[in-house]
Amino acid sequence: MELVLDRFCAGYGAVAVVDRLSLSVAEGEAVVILGRNGMGKSTLLKGILGFLPGAKGSVRLGGQEIIGRPTNAIVRRGVAYAGQEGAVFGDLTVAENIEAGTLISHPGKAREQQIFDFFPVLKERRQQRAGTLSGGEQRMLALARVLLASPKLIVLDEISAGLQPAKVAEVEAALRWERCNRGTTILMVEQNLGLALALASRIAVMKVGQIVLEARADAVDIKSELMRQLAP
């Protein structure tokens, strides 16, 4: 599902954090947004999902305008989101959290088993309360629930935070499979440069509420240019 932002603005009250930002994500593409803390990356994602009232400009999803639409209406169009906080139900087991992903869609047992195969640690701990998992494991659980819904567009905010390298590789493999085999579109905010370069078709760098650089992830010298852009 294609996502197109044109002169998009979002913020909190009278404070504009994202200012006239334009960005497109083609159907089946993976775009990763990089940037230092406080540049508006999370605000951008929340604005797209309809969490922030007063967002302006244009957000077109699959060719239809969604600016001003409630979050539940956007989700029903095939969008799934995992933010930085509050992503799991701590009092429920891992299995019950996974099953919560079936409330909107009905993927079936085969799809549920596939998700557990993506993340073996969750399969091992399916009867454990989610609140007792490590922060990184909770991030994996949030992603698992997102994937179970088989969305057309996945929006993720620093999904690799707190994950060990082996678990980051599992996340990369799962998202790559979704994109290659289901044609899923992916928009991610990420701090892990290695994951970004491995997964993305395009990289965007965000500074002070705007995109200041867009480049193909396989471009010559892209890593050195990104390190220059992200340096303090």
Image (tube, rainbow, N blue to C red):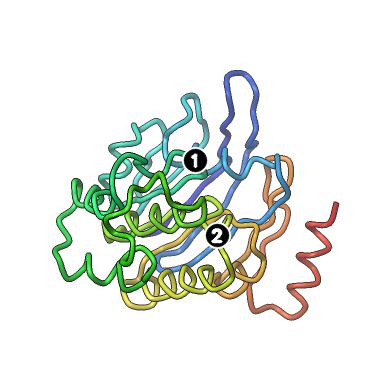
Quarter of the rendering containing residue 38: top right
- Secondary structure beneath disc 1? loop
Q: Is residue 159 left or right of residue 73?
A: right
Task: Work out whether mark 2 precedes mark 1 in sequence or the reverse, and give the earlier one.
Answer: 1
Q: For this rendering, which residue is in front, 29 or 117?
A: 117
Q: Residue at x 61, y 56 (%)?
A: 33
Q: At numbered mark 2, what does the secondary structure look like: helix, strand or loop?
A: loop
Q: Amino acid at mark 2?
A: Ser
The residue singled out by tag 1 in the image is 85
Q: Disc count in the image?
A: 2
Q: Position of residue 134 (x, y in %)?
A: 49, 52
Q: Nearer the viewer, residue 86 or 126?
A: 126
Residue at point 25%, 55% (across, down): 95
Task: Estimate the x, y position of residue 107 in percent, counting from the top left.
Answer: 17, 61
The residue lying at 32 percent from left, 54 percent from top is: 145
Q: Considering depth in this image, is 152 or 92 the residue closer to the camera?
A: 92
Decide: is 74 above or below 114: above
Quadrant of res 66: top left
